[in-house]
Amino acid sequence: MVTLQLCQLDIPPGQRLLIHTRDWAEFEAILTELGEKRSSRIAYSNGRLEIRMPLPKHERAKSMIGDMIKILLEELEMDCEYFGSITFKRQEMNYGIEPDDCFYIQNHHMMIGKERLNLAIDPPPDLAIEVDVTSKTQLEAYTRLGVPELWIYDRTLTIYVLRSGEYQPSDRSPTFPDLPILDWVAEALDHSGAIGRSPALRAFRQKLRQ
């Protein structure tokens, strides 16, 4: 049998690697070998680990939507703690997930100054973002994590709200209930492709102020 180290594997952008692990300890060992300073994303559920390498268009959409949320929070004077694509994992629920972006908003006060997460005592993020360009989001992992609001972008944005243990699509964001988020995200992404990211974000901020 030939044993390969993860550093010997090259995952091209837009591709993914599936690994069937024996137990949680092996999953933790793989995370350690991958390290924290990496461009790949992981998703783990019931012994199956997916390592995916994002495409540039994935990163552009993720950055654009994430920056729009930051602008909304700033302009509406809503406090938040930003945790980016940190790894959420808990052995008792046999899952691990790294959102493209995530925010603590309603529970921001509980996360001030936190450098390490312990899901046995810390809440899940209030809002998470996934961009489905390379692969499809594992909703089950987010259900187990208990993220109340999940935005998934795949050509268009879908807002999912966790109700009675299941995600249901919604035309409104519980975090920004009075705003036409779906229309605004579509418009800003179209503008970014035509006039560039920075002008599109400035136009979005101006629209919000009006």
Image (cartoon, helix red, strand yellow):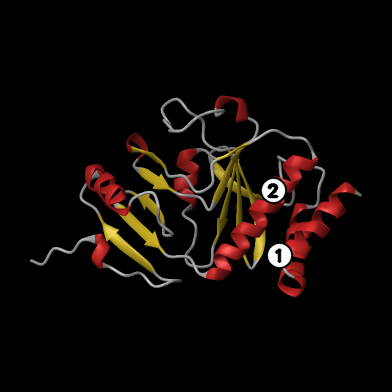
**Figure quadrant of residue 17:** bottom left
Name which residue lies at 74% across and 56% down: 182
Decide which of 83, 27 is in the foreground and name it: 83
Residue 109 lies left or right of residue 36; in this view the side is: right
Numbered disc total: 2
Relative to 137, say whether 9 is above or below. below
In terms of sequence position, does the residue under pointer 1 or pointer 2 come before the other? 2
Decide which of 27, 72 is in the foreground and name it: 72
Label 2: few (<14), some or many (≥20) within 10 Å? some
Asked if residue 149 shows in the view, the reply is yes
**Figure quadrant of residue 152:** bottom right
Residue 24 lies left or right of residue 143; in this view the side is: left
**Figure quadrant of residue 88:** top left
Asked if residue 107 shows in the view, the reply is no
Residue 117 screen position, x and y as percent: 44, 33
Q: Which residue is disc 1 drawn over?
A: 197
Q: Which residue is disc 2 drawn over?
A: 69
Residue 56 screen position, x and y as percent: 54, 69
Residue 121 screen position, x and y as percent: 45, 25
The three-letter amino acid code for the residue at tag 2 is Ile
The answer for how far apart the CA atoms under marks 1 and 2 are is 14 Å
Label 1: few (<14), some or many (≥20) within 10 Å? some
Residue 178 screen position, x and y as percent: 82, 43
Relative to 39, say whether 172 is above or below. above
Residue 206 lies left or right of residue 197; in this view the side is: right
Image quadrant containing the N terminus: bottom left
Camera-near label (1 vs 2) is 1
The three-letter amino acid code for the residue at tag 1 is Arg
Name which residue lies at 77% across and 35% down: 77
Name which residue lies at 74% across and 47% down: 71
Decide which of 192, 14 is in the foreground and name it: 192
> SS for tag 2?
helix
